[in-house]
Amino acid sequence: MSIETESAADGEADHVDQLATELGEGIAQLPVYEEYLQAKAKVENDADAQRAIEEFEQLREEFQMARQTGQATQEDLRKVQEAQEELHDIASMSEYLEVQNELELRLQEINELVSDQLKVDFGQKAGGCCED
């Protein structure tokens, strides 16, 4: 590769990096992203939500371990589901999940716009996960 070609390639890479930075900054300024951050902060500062999250996570972990050893029961599954329902019934958590879903949908739309230009699923490829 000649020096001129390397320089042009470096310039293109810099331009793409700048566009990626601008895209990230633009996403961070979306109203739905701001709503997501606010909803997340509410959950983090809600003692009831934090208690319910810890309880749910503990029950889920116990259930997964029991399932791996073949000892999980329908009652265990029911307890996990009830804990999840209680968690989702907390107003701050319900709001957080709703806004999180809205943000994910918006990010999916952005991914589709980028992917259309590349003719590949950009979000999937950028995730770095290998698929057979």
Image (cartoon, rainbow, N blue to C red):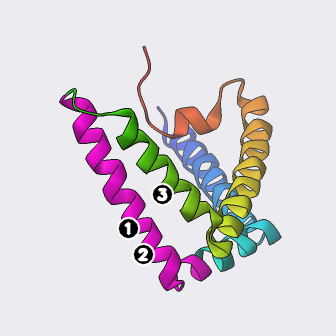
- Amino acid of disc 3: Ala
Q: Position of residue 120 (x, y in %)?
A: 66, 25
Image point 70% across, 56% down: which residue?
19
Marks 1 & 2, CB-CB < 8 Å contact: yes
Mark 2 crowdedness (10 Å alpha carbons): few <14, some 14-19, many ≥20: few
Q: Main secondary structure of the magenta part?
A: helix
| Residue 4 vs residue 36, the one in the foreground | 36
Q: Of the residues tagged 2 and 3, which is closer to the observer?
A: 3
Asked whether the viewer can see residue 28, the reply is: no
Q: Secondary structure at mark 3?
A: helix
Image point 68% across, 65% down: which residue?
94
- Amino acid of disc 2: Arg
Give the residue pinned by disc 2.
Answer: 51
Quarter occupied by residue 109: top right
Q: Of the residues tagged 3 and 1, which is closer to the observer?
A: 3
Give the residue pinned by disc 1.
Answer: 54
Q: Is residue 114 left or right of residue 5?
A: right
Asked whether the viewer can see residue 131, the reply is: yes
The residues bearing labels 2 and 3 have C-alpha atoms spaced at a distance of 11 Å
Q: Is residue 107 left or right of residue 79?
A: right
Q: Position of residue 60 (x, y in %)?
A: 36, 49
| Residue 11 vs residue 57, the one in the foreground | 57
In this picture, is 58 found above or below 3? below
Q: Where is the C terminus found, in terms of image quarters?
A: top left
Image point 26% across, 48% down: which residue?
62
What is the span of residues highlighted in magenta in the rendered image? Answer: 41-69
Give the residue pinned by disc 3.
Answer: 83
Q: Secondary structure at mark 1?
A: helix
- Return the disc, 3 or 1, that comes first in the chain's sequence: 1
Image point 50% across, 47% down: which residue?
81
In this picture, is 39 found above or below 101? below
Q: Secondary structure at mark 2?
A: helix
